[in-house]
Image: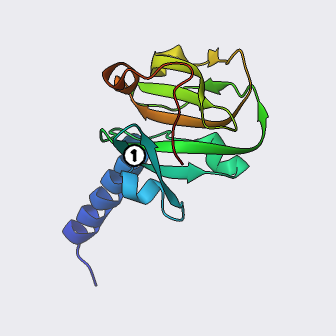
Amino acid sequence: MRNKRTNWLFGIIIIVSALAFFFFPRSISNNFQGYSIKEVTFEENMFSMWVADTPVKRSLGLSGISKLNAHQGMIFVFTEESNYPFWMKDMLIPLDIIWLNEQKEVVFVKENAMPEDYPSSYIPDTNALYVIEVREGTIQSLNIEIGDSFEL
C-alpha cells in the first residue's frame, strides 16, 4: 500500500503533467506525425515543408507551434484554384504567407502576419492552388515578389 506522501506526490505529478499539456505548446515533431514532407525551392533556398493536403490538416496548419526554423514551413495543397483566405487562429508566432497559382508563381503575399490579428483573415485578390507559411521575415530576406516562381 502506498503511504499518504506517495499518493500526494503522484497527485502533484498528474496535475503538473495536465497543466503542461494544456498550457505549453507541443513540440514540432509531435504536431506533424503522419504528415508528408515536401522540399520546396525558391532560387537557391530549399525549404522542408509539412504538407497540409486534407481539410483537417489545412484547418490546423501551424497552430500551436512556438518555434519555426529558418527553412521550415508548411505548404497547403488544394484541389482547385480559388482565393483561399488564411487567418492566425491559435498561432503563437508571426508568419509570412505566400500564395502560389497552378504554375507555382507567387500571386499574393502577406508579410508579418501576427497571432493577435485573429480573427481577421488575409484574402488574396487572385486565385491560388498552393499556400506556403514560413517564418516571419522570409519574404523580405529573400526578396520574394509577385511573379516569382517556386519549385515543388
Q: How many marks?
A: 1
Q: Relative to 75, is 105 above or below?
A: above
What residue would you read off at disc 1?
A: 47
Give the image location of residue 32, x and y in percent. Answer: 48, 56
Q: Relative to 146, is 25 above or below?
A: below
Quick check: 134 left or right of 7? right
Give the image location of residue 16, x and y in percent. Answer: 31, 52
Residue 94 at least partly seen: yes
- What residue is rendered at 54% in x and 28% in y? 98
Instruction: Kindly indicate the quadrant of the structure image that contains residue 35.
Output: bottom right
Q: Relative to 56, is 96 above or below?
A: above
Task: Quadrant for the N terminus, please.
Answer: bottom left
Give the image location of residue 90, x and y in percent. Answer: 52, 32
Q: Residues within 10 Å of mark 1 (few under 14, many from 20)?
A: many
- What residue is rendered at 31% in x and 23% in y? 141
Residue 25 at least partly seen: no
Residue toward you, 49 or 105: 105
Residue toward you, 13 or 148: 148
